[in-house]
Image: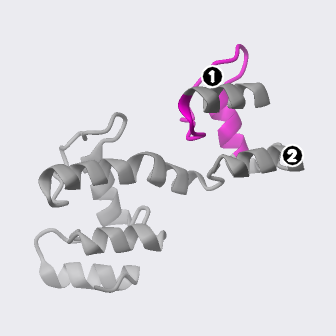
Amino acid sequence: MWPALKAYHAARGHLRVSQRHRGDVEGVHLGEVVHNIRSHQAFLQHADFVAWLDARGFAYDARRARLVGTVWPALKVYHAARGHLRVSQRHRGDVEGVHLGQVVSSIRSQQAFLQHADFAAWLRARGFRMHARDERADRAAWARVGASE
């Protein structure tokens, strides 16, 4: 398992492994291994392995890993290209593997990823609307999130 992670990191320069990723080393379903590390703390009793993961910026929180690895970069690309974050629910995205319209819908309806204050502040600073049409509902939603203007 560790050689598979080392090979993945050497080839890609990061450890943001998709749960579907089968792996570059035969017999290792690397996506499942990483999922088990995050959800069940598998293999974390080995201090040398933890040190290796830490040195490479491994994200132990799967939601944070998805945010930083795919969602936030997709929103940054969208914002840089268009100058706003008014994403249509049908918009598939400019970053592979991200249905940006669905992500934005989840942010609005379920407050997905907004537990991360840095992300919420980034959205807020760029005029992201929690309620696209109703300014009062937008302010109330941001107040519930706890993100100030």
Numbered label attached to residue 62: none
Is residue 3 visible in the rendered structure shown here? yes
Range drawn in magenta: 12-37
Q: Earlier in the sequence, mark 2 or mark 1?
A: 1
Q: Considering the numbered disc 1 on the image, is that residue within a helix, a strand or a loop?
A: loop
Q: Is residue 144 left or right of residue 57?
A: left
In screen coordinates, is 93 left or right of 81? right
> Which of label 2 and label 1 is nearer to you?
2
Q: Quadrant of the C terminus?
A: bottom left
Q: Residue 8, how many percent across, how many down? A: 62, 28
Q: Residue at x 75, y 49 (%)?
A: 40
Q: Secondary structure at mark 2?
A: helix
**Observer-nearest residue: 94 or 91?**
94
Can you give x and y, in whole percent of width and height, for residue 4 in the image?
Answer: 71, 25
Give the Cα distance between marks 2 and 1: 22 Å
Can residue 1 be seen in this snapshot? Answer: no
Residue 121, quarter of the rendered image: bottom left
The N terminus is located in which quarter? top right
Color encoding of the figure: one colour
Residue, x 40% and y 66% (percent of image)? Answer: 119
How many marks the image carries: the answer is 2
Q: Position of residue 138 (x, y in %)?
A: 21, 78
- The main secondary structure of the magenta stretch is loop
Question: Which residue is tagged 1?
Answer: 23
Q: Name the residue located 45 percent from the left edge and 54 percent from the top edge.
A: 67
Q: Give me the residue at 29% from left, 53% from top.
A: 75
Q: Is residue 55 located in the magenta-colored stretch of the structure?
A: no
Which residue is disc 2 drawn over? 48
Q: Nearer the viewer, residue 145 or 26?
A: 26
- Which x, y percent locates residue 146? 40, 84
Establish if 1 lies above or below 140.
above
